[in-house]
Image: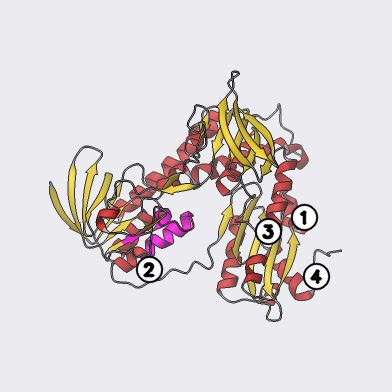
């Protein structure tokens, strides 16, 4: 058994863990990072990166299918080589995992492949994947173990043909049909991807559709997905999953007092996530939890001095960019800083097709806070760049305070919404008004002009390039 001392011992190498490791070394700390699987965690290996790689394949397939509209003649009919799509996905993942690993090593982060648990607040027991056992002394510890797919406790959910968001990314044959249980972000992103690739998709949501999204945009998105052949049912009670004699999967559910069934080649369960805390020794170390998640304050401190937590394991917004910022703050605070995180301007993006992105307040939350608000709009159907791309679906919605014109929220559905939302975030953070954005010259022709024109609609009463009748 070996004994070593580190300024920061990190359990988990996802966005929270690896960003914390790099930030701590930048501050001069000696860092140990323990990861039981691949560096990058869920985001790089089973979430953000693989799903967006598949989304690009789906979008390209759709573009090729309508090439004639752009004056491009192609021989034959476009088809999806699904094994090749999945191979490209894996190649992108492996490249990024290796890139992050190399970056960690370049910062002299010591990486151990294995598992770790707390022997005490400043001592870790590390069991490496090669069988070695190490006892590590750490001045500070960061718990960044992330989360995994939650079991919905639905009869039949553990049977053959039932997949979670990890297993679906390992498919080698494109399903002809799929039933997606869960109409939230993960469920709708995967539903959109497989719909683009040609799978017949049915989505079943227990309560609402994209609850975390501006509801005006959510209604528009639902109608658009329906026009693309996706069946979406919400407000239902699931009864169970069974495999039929013909090999098809059947999901039984009750809606409005009547029994219904949805059949598919596979069933994808996307109903939430649970914290990965098994075997960490939290209770023995006296670390407080809530619903299984590690409790932290705004400085990422747990209930035990010297032990920090960041990312999904804390139960906050389960987003990679949130985890990364939490990890960086935890590293700074572990090495003597006092950085508190502000969660008021977390950008939220749904990588469906088209994308949906939001930052700041929506109408309901602004009114709940007592603000006297108005909402301006500008459609991408009136944006020159969107029309050249053939991507005119969607719009920008801007929530602002009457009188002062201060921007409170920006909500976008349309092409590259995930890229555009940063302008809204900067505007709100800087306290800009709608007139500030209306007068800010934007490059033409660009998608960003839609944000400017939404601001002009608020400032001038109507936008330059769109008249609301």
Specify start and end residues of the magenta stretch as a single range: 308-329
Mark 3 Cα-neighbour bin, 10 Å: few <14, some 14–19, many ≥20 = many
Mark 1, secondary structure of its residue: helix
Residue extending farthest bottom: 403
Q: Which circle, 3 or 2, is nearer the viewer? A: 2
**Which circle's residue, 4 or 2, is located before the other in the chain?**
2
Tell me which residue sits at (27%, 59%) in the image: 286
Picture coordinates of residue 418, whole percent (x, y): 59, 56
Mark 4 Cα-neighbour bin, 10 Å: few <14, some 14–19, many ≥20 = some
Tell me which residue sits at (68%, 59%) in the image: 447
**Residue 322 is a magenta residue:** yes
Q: Which mark is residue 462?
A: 4
Mark 4, secondary structure of its residue: loop
Q: Which mark is residue 299?
A: 2
Left or right of 281 in this view: 91: right
**Residue 114 is a magenta residue:** no
Mark pair 1, 3: CA separation: 11 Å
Picture coordinates of residue 295, whole percent (x, y): 38, 61
> Is residue 109 visible in this depiction of the protein?
no
Task: Return the residue at label 1.
Answer: 381
Q: Which mark is residue 348?
A: none
**Which circle's residue, 3 or 4, is located before the other in the chain?**
3
Mark 3, secondary structure of its residue: loop
Q: How is the image coloured?
A: secondary structure
Task: Say above or below: 102 vs 162.
Answer: below
Task: Return the residue at label 3.
Answer: 447
Q: Which circle, 2 or 1, is nearer the viewer? A: 2
């Amino acid at each position: 058994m070996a004994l070593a001392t580190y300024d920061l011992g990190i359990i988990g190498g996802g966005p929270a863990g690896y960003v914390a490791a790099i930030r701590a070394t930048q501050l001069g700390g000696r860092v140990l990072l323990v990861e039981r699987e691949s560096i990058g965690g869920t985001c790089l290996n089973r979430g953000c990166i693989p799903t967006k790689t598949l989304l690009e394949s789906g979008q390209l397939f759709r573009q090729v299918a309508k090439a004639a509209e752009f004056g491009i003649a192609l021989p034959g009919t476009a088809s999806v080589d699904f094994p090749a799509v999945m191979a490209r996905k894996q190649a992108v993942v492996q490249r990024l995992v290796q890139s992050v690993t190399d970056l960690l090593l370049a910062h002299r982060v010591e990486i151990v492949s294995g598992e770790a648990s707390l022997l005490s607040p400043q001592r870790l027991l590390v069991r490496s994947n090669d069988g070695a056992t190490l006892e590590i002394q750490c001045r500070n510890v960061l718990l960044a173990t992330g989360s995994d797919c939650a079991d919905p406790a639905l009869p039949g959910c553990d049977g053959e043909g039932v997949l979670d968001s990890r297993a679906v990314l390992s498919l080698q044959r494109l399903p002809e049909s799929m039933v997606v249980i869960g109409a939230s972000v993960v469920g709708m992103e995967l539903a959109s991807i497989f719909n683009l690739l040609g799978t017949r998709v049915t989505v079943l949501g227990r309560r609402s559709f994209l609850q975390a999204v501006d509801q005006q945009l959510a209604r528009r998105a639902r109608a658009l997905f329906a026009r693309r052949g996706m069946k979406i049912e919400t407000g239902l009670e699931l009864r169970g999953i069974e495999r039929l004699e013909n090999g098809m999967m059947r999901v039984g559910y009750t809606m409005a007092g009547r029994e219904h069934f949805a059949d598919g080649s596979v069933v994808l369960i996307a109903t939430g996530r649970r914290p990965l805390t098994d075997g960490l020794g939290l209770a023995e170390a006296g670390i407080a939890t809530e619903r299984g998640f590690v409790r932290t304050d705004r400085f990422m401190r747990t209930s035990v001095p010297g032990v920090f937590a960041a990312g999904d394991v804390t139960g906050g917004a389960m987003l990679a960019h949130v985890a990364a910022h939490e990890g960086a703050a935890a590293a700074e605070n572990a090495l003597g800083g006092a950085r508190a995180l502000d969660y008021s301007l977390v950008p939220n993006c749904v990588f469906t097709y088209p994308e949906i992105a939001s930052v700041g307040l929506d109408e309901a939350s602004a009114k709940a806070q007592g603000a006297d608000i108005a909402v301006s709009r500008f459609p991408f159907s009136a944006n020159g760049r969107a029309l050249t791309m053939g991507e005119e679906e969607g719009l920008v919605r801007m929530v602002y305070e009457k009188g002062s014109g201060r921007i409170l929220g920006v909500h976008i559905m349309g092409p590259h919404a995930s890229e555009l939302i940063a302008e809204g975030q900067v505007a709100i953070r800087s306290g800009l008004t709608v007139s500030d954005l209306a007068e800010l010259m934007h490059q033409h022709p660009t998608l960003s002009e839609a944000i400017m024109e939404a601001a002009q609609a608020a400032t001038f009463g109507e936008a330059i390039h769109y008249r609301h009748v």
